[in-house]
Image (cartoon, grey):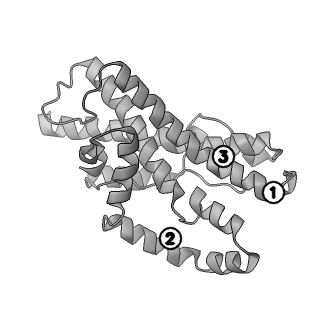
Amino acid sequence: MNSSVEFMIIRGIILYLGFLFAITVYQGTIAIVARKLGDRSFTTNQMATINPLPHIELFGTVILPLMAIILHAPFIIGWPKTFSLETRYFAKPKRDINIIYISAVAANFLVAFIVMVIFRAIGGGTYLLNPATDLSNPDLLIKFIIGSIGITNAILGGLYLLPIPNFSGWQLLINNVSYKLSQKLQEHALTISIVFLLLIILKIFNFYFIFIANLFFVGSNTFMVFG
């Protein structure tokens, strides 16, 4: 096997593992916190796990992220299987919805923080996997996998804070504006999604993602997610 091909495959696997872990933490937290706050619906109970399998959606969790990796996109785009909260179970729906979606992003940032602490404890180092990396060294591979998990949780936590339909930032926005404005926003949800997607593809938000990542990992603007 050509060494460059081997590098691309291993890089892709490491990136995907970080992505899968991050979206599972995010979506699993939504369901777990919702259940704690009273949502006992079958779907919420099914999704209240950090097992990635229930969160996998063919297009958003498999096809699109793998396409991004193969095409060397500057970020991994994708999403877990979505589900609707049964807000009728909540004692205080507005408050509880805020808690749920803030907790989900906080969980991503907590994972990033834990990885940051681990890296500092072992003396720091690069998060980059480059063609010169000794791929036969299991310690290095484990380090890069952990680094991918940390940086991807930081970046996706930042992504989920943006007011993109179905993400935490969107749910928090429509939950805290007037009913009339909420309805207008939801009417234009598809257009808003497309606009944000184009802005991300055009790298308009790269400065934002790099800023979020650097809160945890200094120098992460050169990290493989943006390579």
What residue did someone put label 3 on?
30
- Image coordinates for residue 117, horizontal then vertical, percent: 42, 26
- Please report the residue visible at 37 percent of the width from the left and 64 percent of the height from the top: 200
The residue singled out by tag 1 in the image is 93
Sequence order check, earlier mark of 2 and 1: 1
Using residue 67 as the reference point, say whether residue 55 is left or right of it.
right
Image side of residue 128 versus residue 150, left or right:
left
Residue 29 lies in what quarter of the image? top right
Q: Which residue is mark 2?
A: 193
Which element is circle 3 on?
A: helix
Asked if residue 167 can be seen in this view, the reply is: no
Q: Is residue 196 above or below residue 105?
A: below
Is residue 59 placed above or below 46 in the rendered structure? Answer: below
Marks 2/3: CA–CA distance: 21 Å
Mark 2 crowdedness (10 Å alpha carbons): few <14, some 14-19, many ≥20: some
**In the image, 23: left or right of 149?**
right
Between the residue at mark 3 and the residue at mark 1, the CA separation in whole angstroms equals 14 Å
Amino acid residing under circle 1: Pro
Q: Secondary structure at mark 1?
A: helix
Query: Which secondary structure, mark 2?
Result: helix
Q: CA distance from mark 2 to mark 1?
A: 25 Å
